[in-house]
Image (cartoon, helix red, strand yellow):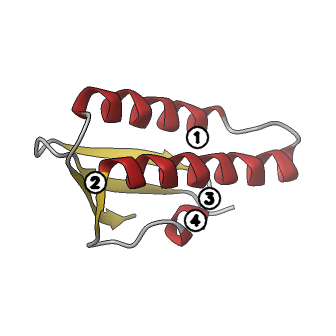
Amino acid sequence: MPALRMFLRWPDGKAAAYYSPSTIVTSYFEAGQTYPLVDFTARARSAFVAASERVRQVHGVPCSRAAASLAEIETCAAMHGAGNVTIEKFE
C-alpha cells in the first residue's frame, strides 16, 4: 500500500506535513488548492479515517500513524479557529 505525506500551510503561515498510509487522501484534496479551515478539517477526518480503514482491511488493524496525523490536524485546526489551509504537495 503506497504511503505519502501531505504538505500544507496553516492559516498562520506555518508549514506542516502529515503521514497517510494510503494515497486515498488525494481523493479528498488537491495540491495547490486552498480550503476554508472548517472544510479542510471535515475532509481530513474523512480522508484519514478512510486511509486507516484501508490498512485495517489489509492488515486487520487500523493505522495508528493515520490516527495520530488526524489528531494533530484536529488540534492545530482548533488552535486556528478560522482561516484557510493550502495543500502544497504530496510526496
Q: Residue 42 in the image: x percent, y percent? A: 49, 49
Q: Residue at x 31, y 55 (%)?
A: 7
**In which quadrant of the rendered view does residue 63 lie?**
top right
Is residue 26 shown left or right of residue 54? left
Task: Report crowding for label 3: few under 14, some 14 to 19, many 20 or more residues within 10 A (C-alpha).
Answer: many
Task: Report crowding for label 4: few under 14, some 14 to 19, many 20 or more residues within 10 A (C-alpha).
Answer: some
Q: Amino acid at mark 3?
A: Ser
Which of the marked residues, 4 or 1, is nearer the chain's N terminus? 4
Task: Report crowding for label 1: few under 14, some 14 to 19, many 20 or more residues within 10 A (C-alpha).
Answer: many
Which of the marked residues, 1 or 3, is nearer the chain's N terminus? 3
Q: Is residue 46 above or below residue 24?
A: above
Check whether the beta carbons of the residues at disc 1 and disc 3 lie within 8 A of each other. Answer: yes
Between the residue at mark 1 and the residue at mark 2, the CA separation in whole angstroms equals 16 Å
Q: Residue furthest left?
A: 13
The numbered dot on residue 1 is none
Say which residue label 2 marks.
Answer: 8
Say which residue label 4 marks.
Answer: 23
Q: Which mark's residue is nearer the viewer, 2 or 3? A: 2
- Element class at badge 1: helix
Between the residue at mark 3 and the residue at mark 4, the CA separation in whole angstroms equals 4 Å
The numbered dot on residue 22 is 3
Check whether the beta carbons of the residues at disc 2 and disc 3 lie within 8 A of each other. Answer: no
Between the residue at mark 4 and the residue at mark 2, the CA separation in whole angstroms equals 16 Å
Q: Residue 59 in the image: x percent, y percent? A: 85, 45
Q: Amino acid at mark 4?
A: Thr
- Element class at badge 2: strand
Q: Amino acid at mark 2?
A: Leu
Q: Residue 66 in the image: x percent, y percent? A: 58, 40
Say which residue label 1 marks.
Answer: 66
Q: Amino acid at mark 1?
A: Ala
Check whether the beta carbons of the residues at disc 3 and disc 4 lie within 8 A of each other. Answer: yes
- Element class at badge 3: loop
